[in-house]
Image (cartoon, coloured by chain):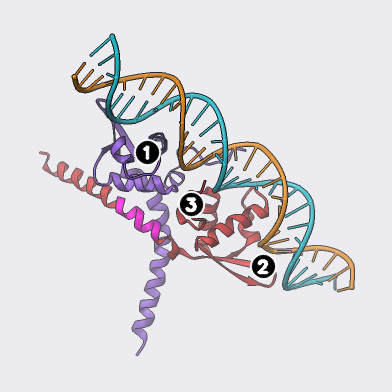
Chain colours: A purple, B red, C orange, D cyan
Amino acid sequence: MSRSTSSTDIFQAIADPTRRAILDRLQHGEQPVMQLAEPFAMSLPAISQHLQILSAAGLVIQHRSGRQRIYRLNPASLKPVSDWVSQYEQFWAAKLDALEEYLEEQP
Amino acid sequence: MSRSTSSTDIFQAIADPTRRAILDRLQHGEQPVMQLAEPFAMSLPAISQHLQILSAAGLVIQHRSGRQRIYRLNPASLKPVSDWVSQYEQFWAAKLDALEEYLEEQP
DNA sequence: TATTTAGTTAAGCATTTGCTTAATTATCTC
DNA sequence: GAGATAATTAAGCAAATGCTTAACTAAATA
């Protein structure tokens, strides 16, 4: 069965909590795999696999430095998610506006 | 093996393209299941299961009207996603600012 | 009351996912 | 060159996921 989800789907990539945690860590600057893996209770290959998925989605960029692989955040690739969710922000903002208006009309 | 992903995880809920499409459709107003299912090339139980996942994540709210189940968007429950992604918006905004500055400094 | 309509629940199945350990590649250091 | 270090690739496995069809529940209608 082949569902339409491409393997580089961004929404799929950020669905996993470990991968989001990796991205969060990368906010404090680029890091080699060893250092990235440090807080997680799983094997290095597991982290490596997560990094491949993040790479495929364009969320991280990699370069080599000696025998280390340095991973860096590529935050602009989150734009599709940002755009998608901002549609709904309007919805709840509209709701809050309506509440404000109502409160102001009260004596 | 029990991964830490709770069954009501919002990021997991919006990872599936069909579920995002359902949410998108609900932007135009609340709808019964039949109507929601109409554009999708899958069985009604499949849609029903997707709606259960969206419900569990708090993304939709349901009420009954006769024999119909009316589903309505609950957009505020997307806030965790919005908050998470907005951290990264700062990153790419900062990058664009830096680019602007650079361009202004050019002769 | 019998039937149709709207939807869910149950059971089953193939694929995908997230991990593991073992083997491999590449670089650095002695 | 022989190890040690950093990381990936390969193979395999249990659990989760996204569907399916069949059976069920509940409300409307003839």
Dot 3 amino acid type? Gln
The answer to whether dots 2 and 3 both sit on one chain is: yes
10 Å crowding of disc 1: few (<14), some (14-19), many (20+): some
Chain of the residue where label 3 is placed in the rendered structure:
B
Q: Which residue is mark 2?
A: B68
Q: In this picture, which residue range is highlighted in magenta?
A: B80-88
What is the number of the mark on residue A58? 1
Left or right: C21 as drawn, with respect to B44: left
Q: What secondary structure is marked by label 2?
A: strand
Q: Residue pushed farthest bottom?
A: A107
Question: Observer-nearest residue: B106 or A67?
Answer: A67
The verdict on residue B85 being magenta is yes
Quadrant of image for the C terminus of chain B: top left
Q: Which residue is mark 3?
A: B12
Chain of the residue where label 2 is placed in the rendered structure:
B
Q: Is residue A86 visible?
A: no
The answer to whether dots 2 and 1 both sit on one chain is: no
Name the mark nearer the viewer: 1 or 3: 3
Question: Observer-nearest residue: B19 or C5?
Answer: B19
Question: Residue A55's image quarter?
Answer: top left
Q: Residue at x 15, y 42 (%)?
A: B102
Left or right: B2 as drawn, with respect to A49: right
Question: Rounded to the nearest whole Å, what is the CA distance between mark 2 and mark 3?
Answer: 27 Å
Dot 1 amino acid type? Gly
What is the number of the mark on residue A31? none
Q: Is residue A70 visible?
A: yes
Mark 2 / mark 3, whichever is N-terminal: 3
**Mainly helix, strand or loop, the magenta region?**
helix
Q: Please provide percent x and percent y for residue A48.
A: 38, 35
Name the mark nearer the viewer: 2 or 3: 3
Question: Residue C2's image quarter?
Answer: bottom right
